[in-house]
Image (cartoon, rainbow, N blue to C red):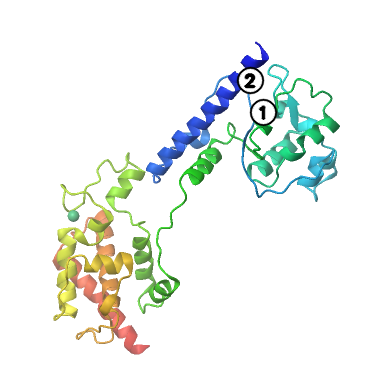
Amino acid sequence: MTEAHSQTAVGQIIADAIQQGITRALELNNNSQQEDKNFYTEPLKYNGDRLASIVIPAPNTPVIPASESIMSVVFPRNSASMSKTLVCDFFIVDPHTHIFRQRSDRETRFPTLLRKFRVAIANGYIQPTSNFEHLLGTSIDTTGTIDLRPLLDSQMSTYILAFDKPKQLAVMLRDSLFRPKPTTTFSVDKWKTFWSLPIFPSILTVWYRAIHHKLPNKSLLHNIVPQSFPSATCIHCPQTEDTLHHFLYDCPTKKSIWLQCLSTFFPDVPIVPGRILSILLLLDYGHFQNKKSTVATSLSFISIIGCILLGIWRSHWKLVFDDRPFTTTRVLPLCSSIVWQLHFQSLVD
Ligand SMILES: [Zn+2]
């Protein structure tokens, strides 16, 4: 195999691995709920020589000062064994490809230290490239035919263990290709108002999860574990997908309970479509913020919304786990009892 040929082959291996990582990152992003367990436990498939590392930019990582012992820099407070480790203990010019690469565990005197070193590199604690030539000169005899392009050409600075740690590669690629989006853009004041609502903590918990779209509606469950949830349809309406909105309010069975319960405590307040969902998911209280019930007089509209949410939530799980019917005659009294419980507690406080 000629040198040029081998370089091309190795470049192809790296390109393939990155392509696989990008493909996987796309999949992760498109369906962030779904995790392919095999992906995290099995190494990426590649052919050709084992390469321990590829390189990506990490401009903010610290530079190792020129030193014969990189270990003493990377692990300054570590044992004497670290300080004896040389560059050539962890890196090698591959005898077949003439490419400078990490040693495999079997090729080093210090496999445990090498693993620690890889972790430090993978986590971006060190930036090995800028001093590599010096380090090479001090610890490796020949530099004549070494191909350093995988390490140096593109000013790439941090190794990641693309082949040993495909999960890290995919997550890193995903986060660089698709910047993590915040689930909410609520202001601090909005959150403060939410957390200071005078309602039971159990209500806040369910509500908080709803805001972050983390309630286990069937559509979400079907996406995460399709084996256990082959259908995404609502438990009450077999023709309709159980989205978050449907799960919370839009389901006709639940909407009827919401409206009946609200009319009990706010007989004079008309509810326009979308209003309850915007209170639940956007904390858009509007003029309801200070509206008190004419029935449970200590409670505000928002507090009673929370009570109904909890009543419907609990009834849902009674249906799922205990087969208790989810009917107006069962759910309404439960919602009301939570409202009255909160009302009397507010009076005592
Ligand atoms: Zn439904």
N-terminal of the pair, mark 1 or mark 2, is 2
Ligand 1 quarter of the rendering:
bottom left
Counting other residues with Cα less than 10 Å from the Cα at mark 1, is it few (<14), some (14-19), or many (20 or more)? some
Q: Nearer the viewer, residue 296 or 107?
A: 107
Is label 1 in contact with label 2 (beta carbons under 8 Å)?
yes
* Amino acid type for the residue under numbered disc 2: Gln
Q: Label 1 vs label 2: CA separation?
A: 9 Å
- Residue 310 can be seen, yes or no: no
Residue shown at the point (26%, 53%) measured from the top left: 243
* Amino acid type for the residue under numbered disc 1: Arg
Residue shown at the point (51%, 39%) measured from the top left: 170
Residue shown at the point (79%, 42%) measured from the top left: 71
Q: Position of residue 95 (x, y in %)?
A: 73, 18
Q: Position of residue 202 (x, y in %)?
A: 37, 69
The numbered dot on residue 318 is none
Q: Report the label total.
A: 2
Query: Residue pushed farthest top?
Result: 1
Q: Which residue is mark 2?
A: 7
Q: Which residue is mark 1?
A: 149
Query: Residue pushed farthest bottom?
Result: 348
Q: Nearer the viewer, residue 212 or 238?
A: 212
Q: Position of residue 307 (x, y in %)?
A: 28, 73
